[in-house]
Each structure stands twice: as structure tokens, then as C-alpha cells.
Image (spheres, grey):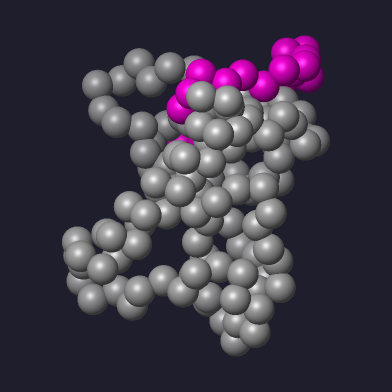
Amino acid sequence: MIALQEVEAHWTRSGEVDQAAAIGELLPLGQEVEDVDPSRARQVVLEPGQSSLHHGWLVHASDANSSDDHRIGLALNYVAPHMCQTKAAGETATLVRGVDRYGHFPPEPAYAGDFDPAVLAFQREADRQKLDFTRKAAGS
């Protein structure tokens, strides 16, 4: 994650968690991660421009945003083309080097400018698939 503004985060533990809780960094359906030991949490304060590099299964959170501005961050996941998402739908990937001989991720449309209709439609469909999967995993 790259902080674009100051954020105080609490990092707890690594390990695979319940599928419904693991989908989506915002836990949009009110899911909770169980068995988190607060005594093992470590506080990390990121200033604008600082970044954290951590495993995708690391349970992390931050306090409510008390500023008058939006909280903005950027998360990047780097995987080799042979990797395959098996626990979620709607995941996309951009090939940044080499050749994709596996086709595990749908090809993204070429970027043609800000608010490109093809790119926006592609992202809306990916978001819809993720939300549908999250609802199904949460039993709603």
C-alpha cells in the first residue's frame, strides 16, 4: 500500500482467514475476521509518500478517518502469469513483462485515455463479479 495521506494502521497476523472475511479489503457486507489477538497488533504510521509492503493475508485495519479529506491509498499485487486466482471472481491483472502463456486473467482493454468507455465497462464488470462473489461467500 502507498499512503497518499497520513494513515495510522494496525497490523496483526498472517494466515489464511475465513473466505467470507478475506474477500475485499473493505469487508462491504459487515464480515469480521475472527480470532485476532489485539496484543499482537503493531502500529504503523505512514506519512504521505511512504509505503508498506506486506503479505496479502496479513490482517490489517486502520482507525476511522477523522480528517475532512478522503482517505486515499493504492494497493498493488504482483504475480507471475502462471499464478491463478482460485478463491474469487472478477480479478484482473495487467501483464507488465514477458508473455502470458496461461490466460488465467481476462485480457484488459488497451487504455485510450481518461474515462475510456471500454476500460470503464471492463472495470464495472470486474467489480460486479467481485461483489456477486462476496455476497455469495457471505451467504447473502
Residue at left 31%, top 20%? 67
Magenta residues? Answer: 28-47
Query: Could you tell me residue 89's position as x and y percent?
Result: 55, 51
Instruction: Answer with left or right where residue 40 lies relative to residue 134.
Output: right
Instruction: Answer with left or right where residue 119 lies relative to residue 77.
Output: left
Vertical position of residue 118 compared to residue 38: above or below = below
Residue at left 50%, top 69%? 106
Q: Nearer the viewer, residue 62 or 45?
A: 62
Residue at left 21%, top 67%? 116
Magenta includes 124? no
Instruction: Answer with left or right where residue 48 lies relative to residue 22.
Output: left
Vertical position of residue 104 compared to residue 26: above or below = below
Query: Could you tell me residue 17's position as x and y percent?
Result: 74, 31
Can see residue 115?
Answer: yes
Magenta includes 45? yes
Task: Tell me where residue 45 sits by quadrant.
Answer: top right
- How would you classify the magenta stretch by its main secondary structure? loop
Vertical position of residue 92 compared to residue 31: above or below = below
